[in-house]
Image (tube, rainbow, N blue to C red):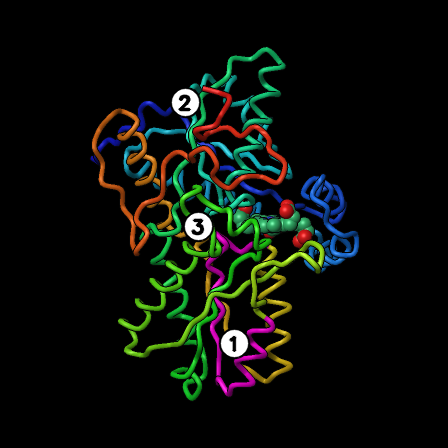
Amino acid sequence: MPDVLDPAPYDALLLLSFGGPEGPDDVVPFLENVTRGRGIPKERLKEVGQHYFLFGGVSPINAQNRALLDALREDFAAHGLDLPVYWGNRNWAPYLTDTLREMVADGRRRILVLATSAYASYSGCRQYRENLAEALATLEAEGRELPRIDKLRHYFNHPGFIEPMIEGVLESLADLPEDVREGAHLAFSTHSIPETAADTSGPAGQHGDGGAYVRQHLDVARLIAEAVRERTGVDHPWRLVYQSRSGAPHIPWLEPDICDHLEELHGQGVPAVVMAPIGFVSDHMEVLYDLDTEAKAKAEELGLPVRRSATVGADPRFAAAVRDLVTERAAAERGKKVAPCALGALGASHDVCPVGCCPARAPKPAAAGADSPYA
Ligand SMILES: CC1=C(CCC(=O)O)c2cc3nc(cc4[nH]c(cc5[nH]c(cc1n2)c(C)c5CCC(=O)O)c(CCC(=O)O)c4C)C(CCC(=O)O)=C3C
Ligand SMILES: [Fe+2]
């Protein structure tokens, strides 16, 4: 008999994700949803559309989320955690508002949210909270009773998120030709964001110098690099680099770009590189296009052997980590003392985003935080 885990006061988990097109006809409307009011140049949109068309207009993200849903339900059932799991997206079906309406119709009153972004930032946290507030406003206008919504803390430093990535890097190193393996560099890659967005990421006390966004990624990179050194006996040099820049060229975004970094390493005589996409929870289009297509083409042109390590995806250790995060938060809500599980130098992230966390350029209401206009 598995131990029975107590999800109370929560009565449902909502997997909240980005969403992506499922065929060629979806690509343009999807991009319109993503970029509404974001001021992204037309040229960039055309270019990103081509990335999707190259893959038949299908983003990998929905299949990844379906696999994660299965993994979560399987893990919860195997461990006696009786908590239904729902799925809603910001930019494509199943849309968040529709899922939330369904949850309310099913009688769910206390909802816990798992966002498919592990780190603090406007794009990875607050924007999802704004989407939750918009969905609640819609349900309110429809005269429905509103559920209370909380969001799980950032899980970038949870061992169930880190360990599969360590294993992925070890596998990529092992896959490199033996004569270049020992000298290989590790390039930990994440989504570039505007420097101002990075500097204001996380709670106000963490602003400046790249903010919580850069600090959290550096901690993950260091944790993985140290584990790789312990397990291989080789100290592979590493750096945090960026990819998938958009927006106007005169606005500074986090650098260096992965392709420039590969060029620089090649110029220094580095014999091989493992690209580790630590900023992405699963194989998003940014991983399949910006790394597996574009960066690999650059490496090929340079004659530089590269490998791209696995993302966490639906790894059972990640599903177990989510179970741990849910029961930890539920216990805390019940007023129990809990020791949150986290690796690295930063400690466990806050449960509730404080006022001033990851501010938007144009302030909008955001749910599931200290400044939420909802209960
Ligand atoms: C930090 C971050 C994450 C990680 C956190 C998280 O996972 O949420 C993320 C995820 C994702 N971003 C995605 C797609 C896009 N992001 C765009 C635009 C932007 N992203 C930004 C940041 C991030 N984005 C930013 C600062 C912009 C500029 C415009 C703005 O300020 O809003 C655009 C517009 C075109 C372009 O400019 O590239 C697209 C199509 C997909 C789906 C991929 C798939 O289909 O597999 C996913 C998971
Ligand atoms: Fe994005």
Count of marks, rendered view = 3
- Mark 2 to mark 3 CA distance (whole Å): 28 Å
Q: Which residue is mark 1?
A: 306
Tag 1 secondary structure: strand
Separation of marks 2 and 1 at Cα, in angstroms: 46 Å
Q: Is residue 177 left or right of residue 324?
A: right
The x and y percentages for residue 41 are 76, 52
Residue 34 sits in quarter = top right
What residue did someone put label 2 on?
Answer: 110
Q: Is residue 282 magenta?
A: yes
Residue type, label 1: Val
Please tell me whether mark 3 or mark 1 is closer to you in this view: 3
Residue type at mark 3: give it: Ala
- Residue 177 at x, y percent in the picture: 45, 84
Question: Disc 2 residue type?
Answer: Arg
Q: Give yes or no for residue 198 being in the magenta stretch.
A: no
